């Protein structure tokens, strides 16, 4: 007690100081000159290790190390924004292609040309995915897209050939629907998954994300609605994300599904499941499908340290050499963006040729609407969800979507 | 710790022969005791609150994070949000969700608490099992419920159809007219343990003699419940309802994991609307507006809570 009496404020002062100093510790930590930092969404162990393998391969000759910070894909943008405001941004920022315009628009990214990163030889779609207002800010090593997976055993047994047009798709899906198995499955969730799956139908029909109510996209919404009304697809598609759709396919509850190449490792684990991939059916025979191009782009944030930026740029160039692109594409089941690398990938993976073919004509989601994409995406999701749940007609839904997408002005 | 240190401070102040310097030192000491709490409140409640209000009047976009500039734009965010159908819809959904959840949680929680207040074999074990939903992270239970409620493969529909209670699978999460109800049911399931535990605790506090007196007076079970249990439980009921209200109105994780706000926006709440505006569309100004509305609603109920508490505890003690 006497001890306490002599200095009562000591613990109090300590606490006060602690609270006060908490406000000052937000400052950036001292960067290690020999370590290049990366922020990405490689939270999956396999992908994280693949990333590290190629980073190490490119960084070693430069005498530096690469350190990845990986957060879930949905949090990369907000994490990057927090890093930017506290001046602790990483040297390389890997964003989803659809998020690039919003970041480029802030002026916080260095144009690749300025930094000395070359994008020649990459497919035009991939370059446009990494560009904002004509300037390339991000480089995509590999891209993914969507195609039609089908259960070869089921189709053979039913005497159905893989559908190439929408009419064939409707007929095939109806014929394949038996007992607990639906003919067709797709994801129609009100988020990025559902919109990504809607786009190949919407675009192939002539739909335009900049003018959603141009009178052509309705057919795509109608097709989805017809599949559900015919009971060729479950009405629960509005709750299935792409992972759920894949689970349905594996469980033998659907004969066909729309999905991406990233599902291949999971599908391959099921030895008794025999499947093949073809391009997504189109409205009229003979036309090529217009599918969305997805994937991430690597960008160089404006950190003010040109020395580190030059090193990071060298790493990006190295990652995109043909040999490294092929290796990376094979490692994560995505299609390399360098034309020569894509050809090699196709030759190595004949089973996935459907994806390699689609990528050639695939479009980036943000090429037309740029930074407005999030608003457009949520408007499109609202449209197909309201039609699939029967609360709106395709025409009314797309009209409403157009007014929602442009509500923000700009 | 705090009580032992508070004693000397008091004795110094109470001492009659205190010169001016010592008195001011004592005052300073007293303030120093208050300081940590005040600083904590300012840093972790005051600052974010003020910041959020200010942000709702700013054009706050990704650019702000790089340049630090967030120009004021008057009421633009507010008019945009209030003119947005999504906001009015989510306000309505939030009201229905909160009322439905509270009603279900409270009635079932109270029924279980009364049930368990009579001791019987395995009652302790059964009570412990009923606590489980509380221990499971919200996202995990939502994901499990999503599987259970699946239209084609879900356990619930399979059961209903095998019992011939329904010929068609119920579109629990895939129909706009049912999805909000499903979300409420899941939230009731999540909230029952909390209500049960607190109310059970309250029931234990009611003196046995009152029940004995009631039975001597010839009161039946319903009369006893209405005239003794309920009035005696009132302070606890207030606490349960207000705390339940505050945690329900800001619901986000359950909805995101269960339905993602769909189908066709039928389960969008104020929480998901804020999330969508701030973290999906990255319009932090508009997101802050919805956040402010949430804070305002919670604040109104917090005031009710404080007033109700004062009258309840003020009389008894």
Image (cartoon, coloured by chain):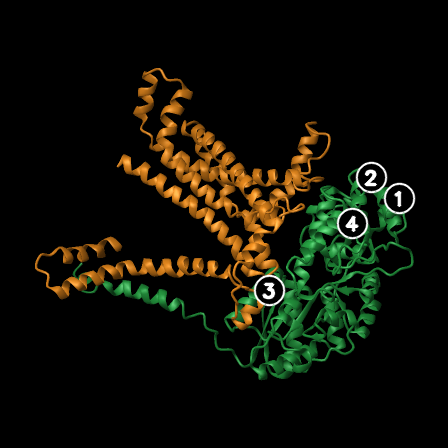
Chain colours: A green, B orange
> Mark 1 = which residue?
A158
| Mark 4 to mark 3 CA distance (whole Å) | 30 Å
Q: Answer with mark 1 or mark 2, whichever residue precedes in sequence.
A: 1
Residue A178 is labelled as: 2
Number of the front mark, 2 or 3: 3
At mark 2, the secondary structure is loop
Q: Answer with mark 4 or mark 3, whichever residue precedes in sequence.
A: 3
At mark 3, the secondary structure is helix
Number of the front mark, 4 or 1: 4
Label 3: chain letter: A
x and y percent of residue A6 in the render? 18, 64
Number of the front mark, 4 or 3: 4
Number of the front mark, 1 or 3: 3
Residue A77 is labelled as: 3
Label 2: chain letter: A
Number of the front mark, 2 or 4: 4
Residue contact at pointers 1 and 2, CB within 8 angstroms: yes
The one of B235 and B257 positioned closer to us in this rendering = B235
> Mark 4 = which residue?
A221
| Mark 1 to mark 2 CA distance (whole Å) | 10 Å
At mark 4, the secondary structure is helix
Within-10-Å neighbours for mark 1: few <14, some 14–19, many 20+: few
Q: Answer with mark 4 or mark 1, whichever residue precedes in sequence.
A: 1
Q: Is residue B52 visible?
A: yes
């Amino acid at each position: 007690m006497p001890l306490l009496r002599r200095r009562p404020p000591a613990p109090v002062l300590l606490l006060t100081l602690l609270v006060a100093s908490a406000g000052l510790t937000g400052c950036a930590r001292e960067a290690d000159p020999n370590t290049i930092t990366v922020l990405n969404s490689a939270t999956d162990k396999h992908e994280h290790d693949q990333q590290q393998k190629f980073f190490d391969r490119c960084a070693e000759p430069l005498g530096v190390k690469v350190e990845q910070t990986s957060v879930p894909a949905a949090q990369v943008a907000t994490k990057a924004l927090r890093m930017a405001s506290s001046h602790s941004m990483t040297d390389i920022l890997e964003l989803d292609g659809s998020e690039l315009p919003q970041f480029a628009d802030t002026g916080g990214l260095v144009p690749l040309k300025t930094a000395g990163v070359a994008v020649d030889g990459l497919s035009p779609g991939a370059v446009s995915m990494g560009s904002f207002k004509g300037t390339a800010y991000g480089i995509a090593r590999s891209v993914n897209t969507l195609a039609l997976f089908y259960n070869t055993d089921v189709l053979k047994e039913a005497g159905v050939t893989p559908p190439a047009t929408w009419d064939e798709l409707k007929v095939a899906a109806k014929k394949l629907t038996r007992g607990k198995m639906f003919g067709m499955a797709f994801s129609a969730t009100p988020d990025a998954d559902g919109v990504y799956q809607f786009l190949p139908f919407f675009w192939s029909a002539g739909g335009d994300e900049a003018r959603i109510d141009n009178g052509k996209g309705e057919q795509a919404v109608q097709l989805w609605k017809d599949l559900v009304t015919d009971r060729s697809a479950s009405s629960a598609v509005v709750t299935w994300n792409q992972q759920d759709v894949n689970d349905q396919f594996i469980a033998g509850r659907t004969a066909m599904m729309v999905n991406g190449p990233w599902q291949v490792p999971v599908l391959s684990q099921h030895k008794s499941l025999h499947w093949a991939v073809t391009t997504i059916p189109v409205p009229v025979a003979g036309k090529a499908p217009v599918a969305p191009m997805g994937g991430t782009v690597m960008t160089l944030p404006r950190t003010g340290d040109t020395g580190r930026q030059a090193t990071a740029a060298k790493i990006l160039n190295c990652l995109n050499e043909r040999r490294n692109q092929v290796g990376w594409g094979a490692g994560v089941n995505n299609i390399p963006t360098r034309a020569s690398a894509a050809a090699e990938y196709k030759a190595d993976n004949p089973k996935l040729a459907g994806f390699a073919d689609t990528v050639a004509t695939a479009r980036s989601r943000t090429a037309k609407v740029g930074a407005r994409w999030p608003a457009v995406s949520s408007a499109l999701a609202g449209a197909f969800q309201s039609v699939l749940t029967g609360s709106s007609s395709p025409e009314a839904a797309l009209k409403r979507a157009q007014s929602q997408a442009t509500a923000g002005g700009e | 710790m705090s009580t032992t240190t508070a004693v000397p401070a008091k004795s110094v102040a109470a001492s009659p022969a205190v010169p001016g310097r010592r008195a001011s030192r004592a005052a300073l000491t007293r303030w120093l005791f208050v300081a940590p709490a005040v600083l904590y409140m300012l840093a972790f409640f005051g600052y974010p609150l003020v910041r959020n209000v200010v942000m709702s009047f700013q054009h706050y976009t990704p650019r702000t994070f790089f340049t630090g500039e967030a120009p004021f734009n008057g009421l633009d965010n507010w008019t945009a949000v209030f003119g947005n159908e999504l906001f009015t819809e989510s306000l309505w959904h939030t009201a229905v969700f909160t009322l439905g959840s509270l009603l279900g949680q409270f009635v079932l929680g109270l029924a279980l608490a009364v049930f368990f207040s009579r001791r019987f074999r395995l009652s302790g074990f059964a009570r412990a099992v009923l606590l489980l939903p509380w221990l499971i992270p919200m996202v995990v239970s939502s994901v499990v419920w999503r599987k259970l409620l699946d239209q084609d493969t879900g356990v619930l529909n399979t059961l209903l159809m095998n019992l011939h209670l329904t010929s068609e699978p119920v579109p629990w999460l895939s129909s706009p007219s049912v999805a909000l109800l499903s979300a409420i049911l899941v939230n009731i399931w999540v909230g029952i343990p909390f209500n049960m535990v607190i109310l059970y605790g309250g029931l234990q506090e009611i003196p046995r003699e009152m029940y004995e007196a009631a039975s001597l007076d010839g009161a039946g079970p319903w009369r006893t419940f209405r005239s003794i249990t309920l009035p005696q439980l009132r302070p606890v009921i207030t606490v349960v309802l207000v705390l339940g209200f505050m945690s329900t109105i800001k619901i986000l994780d359950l909805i995101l994991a269960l339905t993602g706000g769909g189908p066709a926006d039928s389960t969008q709440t104020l929480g998901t609307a804020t999330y969508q505006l701030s973290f999906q569309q990255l319009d932090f100004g508009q997101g802050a507006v919805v956040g402010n509305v949430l804070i305002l609603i919670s604040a109104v109920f917090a005031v009710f809570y404080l007033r109700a508490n004062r009258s309840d505890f003020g009389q008894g003690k």
